Image (cartoon, grey):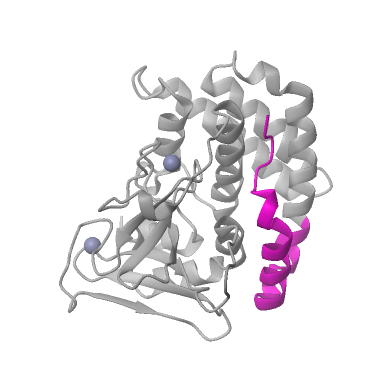
Amino acid sequence: MQTYVLDKSNYVSSMDHCTKWYPSFKEGKVYIEEYQYIAEIYAMEEGVEWKDKDGEELISGYLKNVFGKLFYPNAQNLNMVYSTVQKWKDFMAQVDSVQKETWETALRLFLDRKNGWILADFETWMMTLTAQHLYSYLNEKEANGDPLLNPNTDCICPRCQTKSHFGLLQKDEGYRQLECWLCGYQWMTERIRCPYCNEKSQKLLGFFEVEGIPGARVHFCKSCDQYVKVFDFREIEGFKPVVLLYHLATLTLDDIAVKEGFVPGSGLVWDERFMEGQKMKV
Ligand SMILES: [Zn+2]
Ligand SMILES: [Zn+2]
């Protein structure tokens, strides 16, 4: 059974690439490498029991055993792990039984910034990695196949119903491949259409790039003011990146998108200033 959090086949080349292109990724890289090591051991030792746990136990156990170990040397980070565990427990005690029927549904609600639980990038970072690992382990994730054969018109993952946050440009003009941050599924959407509100007017859709963050773009929509982050590696023949890694290596771009006045269509918070802004408006 696969226990990997990130796709091993392209992991090394993606990691090297991210380190070369995004110098600020250095610290993140160390954490991701150590995280994978700890998470894989935890899955080997306790994974068989995951199936019998409810959502509250499953996720709080994972956070404590994996991120608790990872951040053990750093008291401040460790406190944040434990406060996130407490928040998750409080959240699960409040939501109704329908909403917590599956842990994926509950986690989506928990992570949606509109619901006010998540306040820091750090929490989204931990929860995203947790979700990918648990999902792939518990569902014995089948291969994606060719994303071109998975057409869809919008941002909702056809496999687990989560709203996408990032994607990849395809050689085939007019298409954009979106990827699910929770289950890793990939599908195709039209490039000239907002995946969140379906706006098709070229006047209202656009993108920008930022110097120093190569290969990444913010596709925005002026109709709903939301954005999706898109990577462009079309020039590197045959390269299949682990897109989640690139996303984690370029969170600065999310900060900039938010500063430009757009909100992430996925509902994931990747910027603390955004929440501060929200608070100020209240
Ligand atoms: Zn999904
Ligand atoms: Zn839109």
Residue drawn 49% across and 48% down? 181
User: Is residue 20 highlighted in magenta?
Assistant: yes
The answer to whether 46 appears left or right of 85 in the picture is: right
Q: Nearer the viewer, residue 34 or 262?
A: 34
**Image quadrant in which the N terminus is located:** top right
Decide: is 23 above or below 132: below
Residue drawn 40% across and 56% down? 178
Tell me where the magenta segment starts and ends, as one range: 1-30
Decide: is 127 above or below 203: above
User: Is residue 17 highlighted in magenta?
Assistant: yes
Q: Dividing the image into four equal quarters, which quarter contains ligand 1?
A: top left
**Residue 174 quadrant:** bottom left
Give the number of marks.
0
**Residue 148 quadrant:** bottom left
**Image quadrant in which the C terminus is located:** bottom left
Could one spot residue 266 in this view of the protein? no
**Residue 250 quadrant:** bottom right
Q: Position of residue 31 (x, y in %)?
A: 75, 54
Q: Position of residue 214 (x, y in %)?
A: 55, 80
Q: Which of 266 and 6 is in front in this view?
A: 6
